[in-house]
């Protein structure tokens, strides 16, 4: 039995590498996600009295690592040389760009512009070491048994550790035990192309007369009544709001109470509404709700701007994973209605809240996911800087040049600084760490480490405990002593992380199979 077991382990590692999860994720980031981030970034537009221009972007090209010497010559650089000379092992990125004059019918041809360097993961598809034999690796000064899966920045080896998080795009129900009042939350971390939006729906008994159900999401200060948001999304009438949430009479009474209280906040004109047709009344209620949100997000601005800003915030920052187009508002309303019913079922004891420590409700974010966050923020910094440089050139009457407008160090320094220090976007620290080279086992262990985002100073007894669902996924033995105990974990020896993919792909495959889909 013992021999057969180790034979199974050997055959597993004949097919999979010990750091496959990092390398495959990084390859996907380089081959697909970078281009997707560039494609969804809004084009730069420059408008003033001297001209009206739009910057178009095309395909990105990533070249294998090379270095420029003092005499101006270029030479290929390998990891060993980068370590010895305290250099960055990074790829050079070129993006197709063209500046189009909106007053002209002629379209400018796309030209390749150097935009910066991307730190390169060893043994990834664009690394010089990719696909080399043991003999070839030794000729390049590399250890054939070195697994790769880390970066070299300023000559230091930096490992990006796997981060554990609550499953995105999934409703997580939570009951908060309070001595007198019933209190519960439904939370969704909505993620679209690296952008994260946390939506929290909360049921809490108000101290005075007020709304039970309140919702919060990015760029809207504080909390707003749920029923007002549902009206803004297209569920205009009272009956539609109540019936879409639940058929249960008790739940409908909760919603009816909230509708009654929230109508005072909307400041509705009952006499005017009495003279309207049904369609006019629905549109009036929808606009009243949008104006209420507009007063929160753009207080003191003109009414037209407040309405535009409110609609923009709803489309972009409320459940962005469902789409950011205006025609997705009704779908978002139905999603929130389902979420509300689930929350009320927790309040009434008809449904158990989710176990946040259950591994079904968690996801692991590996190198590709974390680099995607970093690149999205760095690229938006680059586009802002380009916009500033072009506007400055235009105001000075200079001829516009894309190559002069692109300052490549903006993107390079943003990404390099995060990997060199471990300070990631979103205020997280310690995401990248100096690779442990005390022993070969320590290196392998470090590259398979999983870190929880929970604060170390709090007890978090349940989060630190070994959960039954970690069997076969997380090593039950390897965890540090002290404040990190149970929060810093390691993948089990034969654990393989499956890669996520776009849900729309699944829907398209089902459609191609001629399966009848029922809404």
Image (cartoon, rainbow, N blue to C red):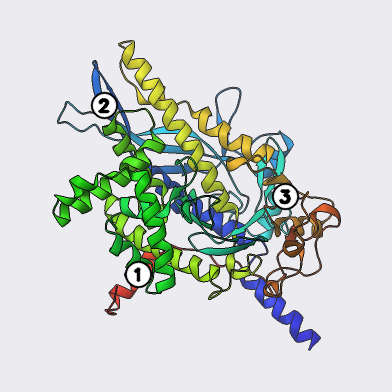
The answer, for residue 262, to whether it is visible in the render is: yes
**SS state under label 1:** helix
The CA span between labels 3 and 2 is 48 Å
Along the line of sight, the residue nearer the viewer: 88 or 303: 303
Residue 120 percent across, percent down from the top left: 59, 45
| Quadrant including the N terminus | bottom right
Residue 448 x, y percent position in the rendering? 70, 60
Residue 463 x/y as whole percent: 72, 62
Which residue is located at x 76 percent, y 66 percent? 465
User: Taking 272 as reference, is 50 above or below it?
Assistant: above
**238 or 479: nearer the eye?**
238
Category of crowding for the residue at label 1, using alpha-carbon neighbours closer than 10 angstroms: few (below 14), some (14–19), many (at least 20): few
Instruction: Find disc 3 in the rendering and name its residue.
Output: 455
Secondary structure of the residue carrying tag 2 is strand
Q: Nearer the viewer, mark 3 or mark 2?
A: 3
Residue at 30% over, 11% down: 397
Image spot of residue 440 (x, y percent): 80, 57
**In the image, is 354 to the left or to the right of 116?**
right
Residue 53: mark: 2
Q: Nearer the viewer, residue 359 or 32?
A: 359
Query: Considering only order in the chain, which callout, 2 or 3, is on the residue closer to the N terminus?
Result: 2
Please give the count of numbered marks on the rendered protein: 3
Instruction: State the CA–CA distance, disc 2 to disc 1.
Output: 39 Å
Q: Residue furthest bottom?
A: 1
Specify the quadrant of the image occupied by residue 451: bottom right
Which residue is tagged 1?
507
Q: Quadrant of residue 331?
A: bottom left
Q: Residues within 10 Å of mark 2 (few under 14, many from 20)?
A: many
Residue 384 vertical placement versus 123 (above, below) = above
């Amino acid at each position: 039995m013992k021999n057969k077991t180790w034979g199974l382990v050997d055959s597993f590692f004949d097919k999979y590498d010990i750091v496959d999860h990092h390398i495959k994720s990084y390859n996907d980031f380089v081959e697909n996600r970078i281009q997707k981030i560039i494609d969804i970034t809004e084009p730069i537009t420059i408008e003033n009295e001297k001209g009206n221009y739009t910057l178009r972007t095309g395909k990105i090209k990533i070249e294998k690592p090379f270095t420029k010497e003092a005499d101006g010559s270029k030479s290929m650089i390998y990891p060993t040389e980068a370590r010895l000379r305290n250099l960055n092992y990074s790829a050079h990125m070129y993006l197709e760009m063209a500046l189009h004059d909106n007053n002209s019918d002629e379209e400018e041809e796309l030209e390749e512009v150097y935009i910066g360097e991307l730190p390169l993961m060893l043994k990834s598809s664009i690394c010089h070491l990719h696909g080399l034999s043991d003999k070839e690796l030794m000729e390049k000064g590399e250890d054939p048994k070195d697994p790769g899966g880390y970066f070299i920045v300023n000559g230091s080896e930096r490992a990006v550790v796997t981060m554990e998080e609550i499953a995105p795009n999934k409703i997580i129900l939570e009951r908060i035990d309070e001595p007198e009042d019933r209190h519960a939350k439904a939370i969704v971390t909505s993620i679209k192309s690296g952008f994260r939006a946390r939506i929290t729906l909360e049921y809490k008994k108000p101290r005075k007369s007020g709304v039970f159900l309140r919702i919060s999401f990015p760029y809207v200060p504080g909390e707003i009544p749920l029923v007002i948001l549902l009206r803004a999304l297209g569920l205009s009438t009272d009956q539609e709001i109540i019936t879409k949430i639940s058929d249960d009479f008790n739940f409908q009474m909760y919603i009816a109470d909230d509708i009654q209280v929230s109508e005072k906040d909307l400041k509705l004109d009952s006499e005017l509404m009495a003279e309207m047709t049904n369609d006019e009344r629905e549109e009036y209620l929808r606009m009243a709700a949008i104006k209420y949100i507009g007063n929160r997000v753009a207080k003191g601005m003109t009414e037209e701007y407040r309405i535009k800003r409110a609609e923009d915030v709803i489309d972009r920052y409320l459940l962005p994973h469902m789409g950011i187009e205006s025609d997705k508002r009704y779908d978002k309303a139905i999603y929130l209605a389902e979420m509300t019913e689930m929350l009320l079922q927790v309040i009434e004891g008809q449904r158990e809240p989710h176990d946040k420590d259950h591994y079904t409700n968690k996801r692991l974010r590996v190198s590709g996911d974390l680099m995607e966050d970093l690149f999205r923020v760095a690229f938006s910094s680059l586009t802002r800087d380009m916009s500033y440089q072009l506007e400055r050139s235009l105001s000075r009457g200079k001829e516009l040049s894309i190559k002069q407008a692109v300052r490549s160090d903006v993107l390079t320094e943003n990404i390099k600084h995060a990997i060199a220090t471990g300070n990631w976007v979103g205020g997280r620290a310690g995401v990248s760490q100096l690779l442990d080279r005390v022993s070969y086992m320590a290196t392998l262990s470090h590259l398979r480490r999983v870190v929880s985002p929970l604060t170390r100073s709090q007890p978090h007894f349940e989060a630190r405990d070994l959960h039954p669902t970690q069997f076969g996924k997380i090593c039950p033995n390897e965890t540090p002593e002290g404040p990190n105990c149970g929060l810093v974990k390691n993948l089990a020896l034969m654990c393989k992380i499956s890669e996520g993919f776009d849900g729309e792909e699944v829907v398209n495959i089902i459609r191609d199979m001629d399966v009848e889909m029922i809404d």
